[in-house]
Image: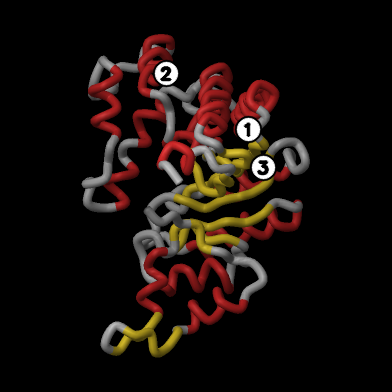
Amino acid sequence: MEANALSMLPKAVLHDHLDGGLRPATILELADEQDYTGLPSSEAGGLASWFYQGESGSLETYLEAFERTTSVMQTEAAISRVAYEAGVDLAADGVVYAEVRYGPSLSMRFGLSREAVLEAMVDGFERARRDSGISIYGIATALRDWSDSVEVARAASRYVGKGIVGFDLAGPERGFPADAHVEACRISTEAGLGLTVHAGESDGPNSMWRALAICGAQRLGHGVHVVEDAKFEHGILTNLGACQRRLKTARFAPVEFCAF
């Protein structure tokens, strides 16, 4: 099968960040509208090149790029536009189902409430659904290194059945264990939201274990460090660790990562 035909096979996307996929031209337009002057380039090509963070060296350095995108997502109109464009761009790539996450607290600098942010995101997704046919829903994200996860969970819980399907923990992993946010996880799951936790992205299997066993995560974001929970002899897998065994036997808790 040719590569272009392969790219248009129906796909589902379960791990996508709304603030991680803005069109460079949109960022420039929103920055102009909101008088934001912190962009590293004033032209779309240069901005796109800067946003490539494949050689950033660490998760913490990589996350610094998100400061630029969230800085232009501070109005309801901007958030709705970004959400709409995310939906139609995914549909153009052959995605038929998507769950796209965003931290509403990141867009509160000029007075928006978390609820207003979530409503704007859902509005954009609904317009994308009407125009492209994609099924697209939101996941509300709280940050591990912030202290407002309970407030995020409560805000997200108000939108169960109204476009928000999950609660997520993201951000720096080392030094910020998921179980510090166990109350937020409890609130969200009791409200009927799915629970996904970034774990095993930059830390080891213990981080994943805590997300599973203490927080009750149903999915784990990235999880690539799970390989450290196995023993190999001469290149052959000889033993699974506790975290890998739990993942293997759990009804839920798939690991969200992609292979190239």
Task: Sort mark 1 into few (<14), some (14-19) or many (20+) by Cα contacts within 10 Å.
Answer: many
- The mark found on residue 118 in the picture is 1
Provide the residue designation for mark 2.
26
- Could you tell whether 258 is left or right of 128 in the image? left
Residue 148 seen in this snapshot: no
Q: Are marks 2 and 3 in contact (CB under 8 Å)?
A: no
Q: Is residue 247 visible?
A: yes
Cα distance, mark 1 to mark 2?
Answer: 20 Å
What residue appears at the point 24 percent right and 20 percent down from the top-left corner?
41
Q: Amino acid at mark 1?
A: Leu
**Residue at 65%, 39% in the rendered image:** 137
* Residue sitting nearer the eye, 186 or 102: 102
Q: Would you place residue 23 above or below residue 65 in this image? A: above
Question: Which label belongs to residue 196?
Answer: none
Cβ–Cβ below 8 Å for labels 1 and 2? Answer: no
Q: Which residue is mark 3?
A: 156
Label 3 vs label 1: CA separation? 8 Å
Mark 3 in CB contact with mark 1 (< 8 angstroms): yes
> Quadrant of residue 152 in the image?
top right
Mark 3 residue type:
Ala
The amino acid on which the numbered mark 2 sits, given as a three-letter code, is: Thr
Q: Could you say where residue 161 lies in the image, as x and y percent from the top left?
A: 77, 41
Residue 240 placed where, x, y %?
A: 45, 84
* Mark nearer the viewer, 1 or 2: 2
SS assignment at label 3: helix
Dot 2: element: helix
Q: Which of disc 2 and disc 1 is earlier in sequence?
A: 2
**N-terminal-most mark, 3 or 1:** 1
